[in-house]
Image (cartoon, grey):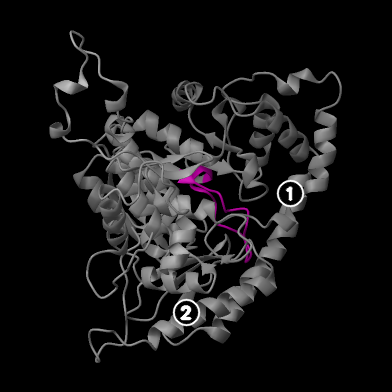
Amino acid sequence: MQLQIDRSIKTPLYLQIRSQIRQLILANELPPGFRLPPERKLAASLGVNRTTVVNAYHELVADGLIQPHVGKGTVVVNAPLSTEHFSLDHFTSGDSRVRPSSIQPISWQNFYTKQSERMYNPVLASILDEIGEEDQISFALGSPAGEYYPLEEFRQISKEVMRSGNWQAFEYGPTIGHYPLRKYLKEWLSHRSIQTQTQNIMILSGSQQGLDLLAKVFIEPGDYIVMEEPSFLGAIGVFKAAGAHILTVPLDQEGLRTDLLEQILSRHRPKFIYTLPTFQNPSGTKMSLSRRQELLKLAYQYHVPILEDDPYSELYYEGMPSPSLKSMDKHGHVIYLGTFSKMLFPGLRLGWCVAPSAVLEQLALAKQHVDLHTSTTVQWMMTDFCRQGLLDKHLLIVRNRYLQQLNTMVTALTEFAPPGLSWTVPEGGFYLWCELPPGIKAATLLTKAAEKKVTFIPGNAFYINSGGKNRIRLCFSRHSETTIREGIRRLCTAVLEILNQPHPASANSRFRCSEPLV
């Protein structure tokens, strides 16, 4: 299968790929059953980012020309037949049954809902597919370093949980969660000035599930919600899939712009305000205390709930984080999401929600239709881990180590970065939020960096609107200091190559731009 990419024309690369494969299929040069190259392999052969090929394949699936199959890859299906392909010969005499030879495979996309189209997130899929690839350095996935996982401690705990006769740890459990774990979280949160009751805590299969459940409970298609911009791409995807109309408020160095938020609240009646006030993803911003107070004041004044997403506050590297909105809330307006994923193991998929009883009742009803309850066994193990004081001990260790990795990335950028590349150093969390030199787009850099086996997330993935094209997010938590330094060297080399590459259409232009990522 020979494809040609023309970067000098305006047609996006993914549409060029889709058009050429479509023509080959309709001309029967790619017959039914033909297996298309894996997305990553085709991307490498064409010199494009994998997401470009993912988007092209997605278009061909929507056209009914290809279909992904587990274990078989993506294969060509029969091209849809037009009405002139049918005649009376397709039917048996005196019988309306269609001959087997005329039956075509179902084009499943014709049965999908509008919501299924809104769920498509090529950026998130690409990030997760990169896990385990040894030949490249990924600064994309925001997760703890595997080498810091307390595996020995969990091995001992798992042996105890799986002791003979302990069948309770493998039973169905209450939807709201394992009571001993919820009781521990109540006490743990109280030390962080969040005063709540055990019955107001729900255990989740990761805080991402909390976002999904809250969207199911609160959002009807067309409802308004408010988000800071940029914001967590996982939350953007959930709220878009629910059909929300998202109103955005920009950030500055103190966090969400409450002066602009008030203008929105005075004109609309949003279902809630979504924010990550502490070490925000992707910017690393820590909302100032005065902004937190003003945000709560506006929530009370306009009677709007706040959804506080707080995965990073325990990963602070300078001073102490500001108090959570939940700890400052005196009138029950804040719903609080937390997770063990950033502190310990993301693979455990274990988080929690603190909310008024009336809200938790609705979340429990929604959760029953999803997974009945979070894994009983995992909850038992986490309870024992926390009760033995191992969580706080682990946090002391990783804070120091992540600070070293952060400093390594900043030092490497200072050494290798060309003029115009800037970044913000956070006080905690996992990310450096970078601004590219004038004229360089993140999508262009992503393609060039992929050639050098280094990846990141382009800034536009964190924007609901059209911003972030000259921004990138780098995660420093997953790699050793040696790997971080090498990855930054490769990335800065890619930036320099773009800076030194003249635009093919103009001798007066220094920069060359590719198609947008999404």
Residue 375: which quarter of the image?
A: top right
Disc 2 secondary structure class: helix
Q: Could you say which is closer to the camera, residue 268 or residue 512?
A: 512
Query: Magenta span covers which residues?
Result: 308-327
Q: Nearer the viewer, mark 1 or mark 2?
A: 2
Determine the residue positioned at 72% across, 36% down: 382
Look at mark 1 in the image and give the residue it sits on: 392
Q: Position of residue 366 (x, y in %)?
A: 45, 24
Disc 1 secondary structure class: helix
Q: Position of residue 209 (x, y in %)?
A: 50, 36
Look at mark 2 in the image and give the residue it sits on: 494
Q: Residues within 10 Å of mark 2 (few under 14, many from 20)?
A: many
Taking the view exactly as shown, the residue that stands out farthest to the top is: 94
Direction from residue 392 to residue 82 in the image, left or right: left
Let me know if residue 227 is in the magenta part: no
Q: Is residue 32 positioned above or below 4 on the image?
A: above
**Residue 292 visible somewhere in the drawing:** yes
Determine the residue positioned at 62% across, 57% down: 315
Work out how far the residue at label 1 is from the one at label 2, CA to CA, in angstroms: 40 Å
Q: Position of residue 41 (x, y in %)?
A: 49, 60
Q: Is residue 498 positioned above or below 114 on the image?
A: below
Looking at the rendered structure, the kind of residue marked 1 is: Asp
Q: Main secondary structure of the magenta part?
A: loop
Let me know if residue 317 is in the magenta part: yes
